[in-house]
Image (spheres, rainbow, N blue to C red):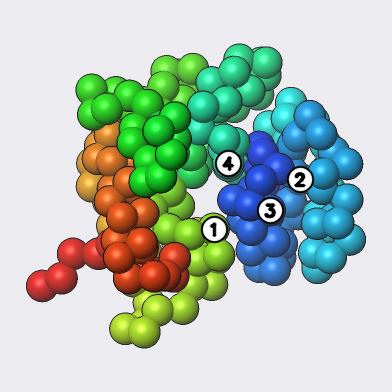
Amino acid sequence: MAAAKRVGVLGSGDVAKQLGKGFAAHGYDVMLGTREPKKLDAWRKETRGTVSVGSPAQAALHGPLVIVATHGAATEEVLSRIDPRSFAGKIVLDATNPLDLSHGMPPGLLFGVTDSLGERVQRQLPDAKVVKCFNTVSSLKMADPKFAHGPVPMWICGNDAGAKRQVDGLLRELGWAGALDVGGIDAARWLEALVPLWVRAGQALNTWEHMLQPVR
């Protein structure tokens, strides 16, 4: 399979599994990278398409697109164990959220709004093109989403304009109405800050099928 249709996903939780399944359904060769491969035995058997499981380091090398879908509080530690050269020149989609659940639900943010996990990922991977993406919706809505009002754009941000144009096309391939680009990677502070509000809205509406969108 062409390298352009290969994607590595770091993580083994719901976000990683749903994104892996979604990309595989669209013809991608997907590798999930985890330190606990047994956790993905059922996912590998039930997921249609070309999928595999490897280590985080192997997943980072799997293709030109890498998705960081690790638990927010563990993200920096996971990345620290991988040679940053593995990400050089690649688009890295950061789907993580730095949620603080130390006081239960609803969550707060680990970093407030003076820093973001998106920025920290970019600092750890200086030669990668990090784009914050997918973090503002339920994992069940990340690929082929269905909303009552039809296709909507996905919030993204990042420093590389070319990478964001490619992500816009990728999102359209996955069923989104392209990307809603809100700026450089520092805007990840605000995309991550949307998530505690998204949780509160979900609790009020008794649903996790919603997405926050501007209306005009």
The location of residue 134, given as percent across then percent down, is 45, 52
In the picture of the structure, the residue carrying the numbered disc 2 is: 31
**What's the mark number on residue 37?**
none
In the image as oriented, which residue stretches furthest toward the front?
A: 103
In the image, which disc is placed on residue 17?
3
Considering the image in quadrants, where does the N terminus appear?
bottom right
Q: Which mark is residue 139?
A: 1
Tell me how far mark 3 sits from mark 1, CA to CA. Answer: 9 Å
Q: Earlier in the sequence, mark 2 or mark 1?
A: 2
Tell me which residue sits at (34%, 32%) in the image.
109
Looking at the rendered structure, the secondary structure element under dot 3 is helix
10 Å crowding of disc 1: few (<14), some (14-19), many (20+): many
Closer-to-camera residue (128/109): 109
Q: Nearer the viewer, residue 147 or 5?
A: 147
Circle 2: residue type: Met
Do the residues bearing badges 3 and 1 touch, measured as CB atoms within 8 Å? Answer: yes
State yes or no: discs 2 and 1 in contact (Cβ < 8 Å).
no
Which residue is denoted by mark 4 in the rendering? 69
Q: CA distance from mark 2 to mark 1?
A: 18 Å
Q: Quadrant of residue 150?
A: bottom left
